[in-house]
Each structure stands twice: as structure tokens, then as C-alpha cells.
Image: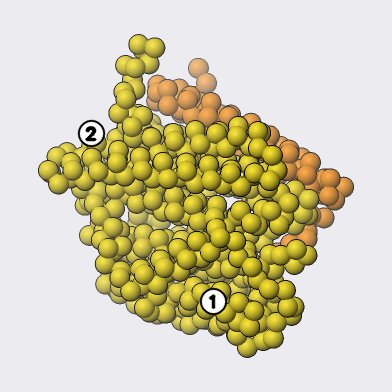
Chain colours: A yellow, B orange
Amino acid sequence: MSAFSQYFTGFDYTLSLPMVLLTLFALGVLLIDLMLPVEWKRLNAVTALLGIMFSGAALFLRIQVPYRAAEARGMSLYRFTHGFGGSIAMDSFAIYFFYLFLAAGAITILMSTRYLEVEKENHGEFYALILLSMVGMMGMACGTDLIVLFISLELMAISTYVLVGFLRRDRRSNEASLKYLLLGAFSSGIFAYGLSLLYGLTGSTRLPQIAAMLNGYLATRPTDPILVLALITTATGLLFKIAAVPFHQWAPDAYEGAPTSITGFMSVAGKAAAWALLLRIFLYGIHPLRPLYLPLLVFVAIATMTGGNLAALTQTNLKRLFAYSSIAHVGYMLLGLIAGDQHRVNADGIKGILIYLLVYTFMNLGVFAVITSLRRRDIIGDELDDISGLWFKAPTEAVLMMTFLLSLAGIPPLAGFYGKYFIFLSLIGTGHYALASLAVVYVAVALYYYIKVVNAMFMRPAVDTVPVSLSPAMRVALFVTAVATVGIGLVPDPFIRAATWSLHLAQYAPVAQLLR
Amino acid sequence: MVPISYYLVLSAILFSLGVVGFLIKRNLITLFMSIELMLNAVNLAFVAFAWQWKSLNGQVFVFFVMVVAAAEAAVGLAIIIAVFRTRETLNVDRVNLLKL
């Protein structure tokens, strides 16, 4: 024990407290579930929500408050952020993403309570797996060591494979889970191979050391084939995880077959976590390779915007349509990483990605909350026909859905506008006019398929007369997402400040230099 | 003394075999074995590099990759059984309810 405490102090555990609390509550849900009779299963959701609240409180009181105090006094932040010998960094970047995951997890749980009862799969494991995958996401946002990042990625991914296949008796859910698992494990293998090559080139698994060693390596051998191979395999693994074209094939299938609330969870929290991982590795670890990866990213971004938007045009299944729309949004976000020159990233671009992920969380979860509420006995509710005539059956929901859709399309003054605004600003500011105009064209294309859904809701007659009933939890979820979508649009300043703050990586000089 | 390049070439060959197997085979269990082969190639590369750099990080990474592979296999086989129960096939081409 004494040898152990020599390496880890209490402070390390304070830094990981949000993750530890979520894990404990996940285990608690599993244990309590065993003792609950069927009619009390809703208590599992309450336990899980409590866990998220405790985790959020720990994050605020134990991490954010001391961090801001140290920041205000101008102290060196390294001591306040790095734990476990420098394996994790609870800096402002991580704190921002932690809040995002907590919000997305809480809204998903609120959306799921009634849905699981309708599907007759109301088991405690569902909530435990959501909490565990959130722990994985948090590790992806705060890890600065390849081992931590890889383990967290797999923790998130494996929990999500099970969640996607949670409707055991549904053949589509099985199939989605299988395809997601096969392609996810395949991409993890490629990613791990890339990590092994990076380790081989640099002799370290710490991102800052990798960056330092790569700088020296590039000076002597700039186009070493091993270096290129390491970059390509690592980037391929990461692009698989954010579902960028041409590595997107798993996304529409997994999104369509998964339980609807999990589709929402994957498309926002899973995507934000993959982006956190990508930004950590690209900004902290391999930023010296920027001249090499820039052409790759330009190609992938154009392919992603084209593929996502054009494929979404012809979809008739709502979940599949939003899967392709989420692929298209990844394309816009990639542009934020491209903005800049050969060696510097534009700070506005990264800020744009962070704000985009924040607003996307709320508007896309809102869309999936509406689709989830369409699930009733005998009606799956994920076809375009199922939403037609919603205005005549449930006017409030139809108006909310329209708000979310217009926000996704990027219409001001809704929240979605600000994500695109900063990304386009950064592109124009760094002279990428062609990419900016292409993105604007695709925004117009995207408007078509969002309006198609609005048209179905308001102009077409309803196919059935079964009323849409909302559980109280679902009402809360819809209320929160709607307030956030409209609120961030009307009062964007605090959120833009939060994103700017999360980029204050002042204690870490290479990144501070990188962002101009 | 065997030079490190031998290990790395072997690792690259194993990894390529895994990728090719994943892309051309149609049986679910074989696909799974291909993924395991890829991860083991990664392990070999890590051990070789750890030996070259005289650092333990690579060795530790191997343990975690093995844990991940085991967890993936556990979840994967459970999912394959669930799929087999509803369809009675292990051919990935016949698991095609969701259009591509």
C-alpha cells in the first residue's frame, strides 16, 4: 500500500472524481436493479440521474472552481490539472466536454424511460451502460496518454455496441449492433496499429512527448514512410469514429437499428467524444505533422459533406436521414480543423467545432426526442410517413421539431447558426474561399431535406389518429433541448465565452503557439 | 540477436492478413478471428518497440490491448448468438435487413 501511495496521491482521485462517481453509480444501478420489482424499474433512471448530478457537482466544486481560482491568481495550472503522473489532464478543454457529456447523458435517460417500457426491455443494465459509456467519453476528453485514450475509447465503444443491440428480440437492432461491432472493432484495430507506430517512432505514450519527439524527427526525415503510415492509420481510426466519408458505412445502419434514444445519444455524445479524442491527438500529439495531414483532411471533409448531404436527400426513414445529416455535420466541423495555414490552426475554427458540438448536442437530441415519442404500441415511428400530419395531432411537438430542424439547417437566430458561423468565419479569415463556398452550397442542399420533414409534418394528412402522448420525463427532455436551442441562439455570448475559455490552454505552450 | 525490423515486418504481415481476412471472408466467426489477428499484430509491434526503446509503456499497452480484445470477444460472441437466434445464419451477407 505504501508503494502504491508513493505514485498516486489523493489529488489524483479528486481529479478523476466525476468518472469515479459515475462508475460507482453504474454499479449501484446494476445492484439495485436486482432487487426492484418490475413496476419499480423507473427507479433505475432516477439512480442514474442522481449519479449524473453528483458527477456534475464534483466536476464543478472539486475541479472547475479550484481551476478558475488558480487561473485568476495567475498560478501555473499544470499542478491543478494533471493527475496520475500526467496521464490525465483536467484542463478547461476537458471540463467543457465533461459538461457536454453529462447534459447529453441526462437528456438521453429522460428520453428513454417511457420508450423502454413500450419496447418491454426495461432493464437496469441500460442505464448502467449509458453511465459507463459516459465514463469512457470522459476519459477520451481528459486523457493525455495513448493508453488512457485507447482504453477510454474502447470502454465507450463496447458499452455502445451493447446499447445498440439492446432490443434483443428486434432483428434490426441485432443486425445494427453486429455491424457496428464489426466495423468498430476493425477501426479500433487500425487505430491501435497507428498508436503502436507512433510509440515506435517516439518512444513515448504521452502526447506532449510524442509531439516534441515528432518535431525533432521531422527535421531529419520529413517523409519517412513509417511516419506516413503511422499518420494514416491513426487518422483512419479516428475518422472511422467520427463517421467521416469514406469511413461512414457503419453509421446509417447502426443509427437505424439502435433504440431511438440511443441513436440520439450516439450521434451527439459519442460524436463529441470522438471529436475530443481527435482534437487531443491532432492538436496535442501529432500537430507537427500538420503539413502532411492537411491534404488528407481537405479530401475527407469535401467527401463527407458531399456524401452525407446527397445521401440524406433520398432517405425515407427518419433515423437514417438524420444519420446522413449527422455525417454531413461532421464534414462542416472538419472544415474548422482545416482552417489555418500549414503550421497553425485557426483558433476560431477550433472554437467553431466546440460550439458546433455544444449546439448540435441539444438540437439533435431534440429531434430524436420527438422521434422517440412517436414510438407507440405497434408503430415503430421512424418512417417519414409516421411523422406526417404531426401538426394536426400534436401541434407543440410539431413546432418544436420544426425549431430543431431549422436550427440544424443553420437558420439564424437559432443555435445551429453559431456553429456554422464561426467555422465559415475561420475559413474566410484564413483564405479558404473555395471550401467556404462549397460548404454554403451544401447548407442550401441540406435545407431541402430538413424542409421535406417539415413539409410532411405540416402539409400531409396523418396516417393514423392515435394521439401522441408524452411522459413527464420526455416533456422535461423536450423542454430542455428546446430552451437550449432557442436560448443559445438568442443569447450566444456566455456559450461563446465558455468555448473560448476551454481553449485557454495557456499552461501548455505548444498548443498556445499553435492556435493563432 | 534478431534485429527489430524482423519483428516489425512480421507484425505488418500479420496485420495485413487480418485486414484482408476481414475484407474478403464472409463468416462472422472468421471476421472476428481476423480482428483478433490485427490486435495481436499490434501487440507484437508494441513489444518490439518497447524492447527497442527500453521502456515499459509499450509492454503495459499490450496488457490493455489484450483486455480490450477479450472484452470485445465477449460482447461480440454474445451479439453473434443473438443474431444467430433470430436468423439461423452466420453469413454476414445474409444479415442484410438494413439496406446499405
Question: Residue A62: x and y, percent?
Answer: 30, 38
Q: Residue at x 49, y 46 (%)?
A: A49
Apparent side of residue A483 relative to residue A9 in the rendered image (left or right): right
As rendered, which of A416 and B95 lies closer to the eye? A416
Residue located at (64% from left, 79% from top): A393
* The N terminus of chain A - image quarter: top left
Disc marking residue A396: 1
For this orientation, the residue located farthest to the bottom is A459
Q: Nearer the viewer, residue A241 or A121?
A: A121
Which amino acid type corresponds to the residue marked 2 in the rendered image? Arg
Q: What's the residue type where badge 1 is placed?
A: Thr
Q: Residue at x 56, y 60 (%)?
A: A472
In screen coordinates, is B53 left or right of A117? left
Residue B14 sits above or below residue A316 on the image: above
Q: Chain of mark 1?
A: A
Q: Which residue is mark 2?
A: A79
- Point out residue A484 in the picture as x, y percentages from the top left corner: 40, 66
